Amino acid sequence: INMTIDEIKHIVEEYDIKKIIIGLPKNMNNTLGERAIITTNYAKLLEEHLNIPIIMFDERLTSVISNSILIEADMSRKKRKKKVDGVAAQIILQDYLNKEKYENE
């Protein structure tokens, strides 16, 4: 679902969100391709309009891990296709939280 900045701003205000974590789709060799540049530009735009930090977090292999988890759960290919991005987003957020916890210990 594509949301406009106004819709995202409404959600940020309604839930008093303090920061947003966005997956950064780096290439496997750690370079930034076209999709990563588009994502980075969008993150900058969000940060300007929302006045909260937008954190870019490496999302390499999260879709692969997500698919593996859903396969282990014996989910059909059709259902996996609908769920893989949501599970990948959960993995990105959990990895970010784990990193924050580790760095603050």
Image (cartoon, grey):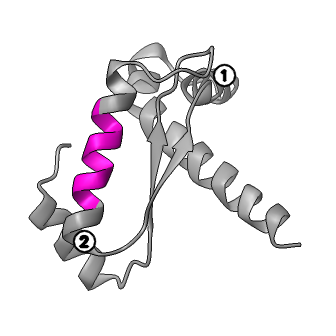
Residue identifier under label 1: 68
The kind of residue tagged 2 is: Leu
Q: Is residue 89 above or below residue 99?
A: above
- Residue 58 on image: x %, y %: 58, 38
Q: Which residues are magenta?
A: 38-46
Asked if the stretch drawn in magenta spans residue 66, the answer is no
Please report the residue visible at 39 percent of the width from the left and 78 percent of the height from the top: 17
The kind of residue tagged 1 is: Ser
Residue 83 image label: none
Q: Is residue 10 above or below residue 64?
A: below
Please report the residue visible at 36 percent of the width from the left and 85 percent of the height from the top: 16
Residue 28: which quarter of the image?
top right
Front-most of 17 and 81? 17
Q: Residues within 10 Å of mark 1 (few under 14, many from 20)?
A: some
Front-most of 103 and 10? 103
Q: CA distance from mark 2 to mark 1?
A: 35 Å
- Residue 95 on image: x %, y %: 68, 49
Q: Residues within 10 Å of mark 2 (few under 14, many from 20)?
A: many
Residue identifier under label 2: 50
Front-most of 31 and 11? 31
Q: Is residue 10 above or below residue 74?
A: below
Quarter in which the C terminus is drawn: bottom right
- Residue 77 on image: x %, y %: 46, 14
**Secondary structure of the residue carrying numbered label 2:** helix
